[in-house]
Amino acid sequence: METNGKAGDNGRHGMVRERSQTQTPLGHWVKRDTNTGQFMDVKQDGTPFKGVRKEK
């Protein structure tokens, strides 16, 4: 069974909260703040952000 590790090891434990991501028609992934709805960041390599839930 896997564990999350120790506190203070500078690693993320679980999903990123208050964020979501969606894919643009060009294939880029866009991260969005769910509180304000503003777009925050774009990944252009075609891979989704880790730990961020996907919108439908």
Image (cartoon, rainbow, N blue to C red):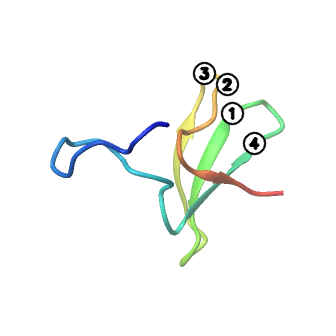
Residue 43's x, y, as percent? 56, 33
Residue 50's x, y, as percent? 53, 39
As measured in the structure, the alpha-carbon distance from the residue carrying label 2 to the one carrying label 3 is: 4 Å
The residue identified by callout 4 is 23
Callout 3 touching callout 1 (CB < 8 Å): no
Of label 3 and label 4, which has the lower sequence position? 4
Rendering quarter of residue 32? bottom right
Callout 1 touching callout 2 (CB < 8 Å): yes
Amino acid type, mark 4: Gln
The residue identified by callout 2 is 46
As measured in the structure, the alpha-carbon distance from the residue carrying label 4 to the one carrying label 2 is: 9 Å
Of label 3 and label 1, which has the lower sequence position? 1
Badge 1 crowding class, 10 Å Cα cut-off, few under 14, some 14 to 19, many 20 or more, is: some
- Residue at 64% across / 54% down in the picture? 53
Callout 2 touching callout 3 (CB < 8 Å): yes
Q: Which element type, helix, strand or loop, lies under badge 3?
A: loop
Badge 4 crowding class, 10 Å Cα cut-off, few under 14, some 14 to 19, many 20 or more, is: some
The residue identified by callout 3 is 45
Amino acid type, mark 2: Gly
Of label 4 and label 2, which has the lower sequence position? 4
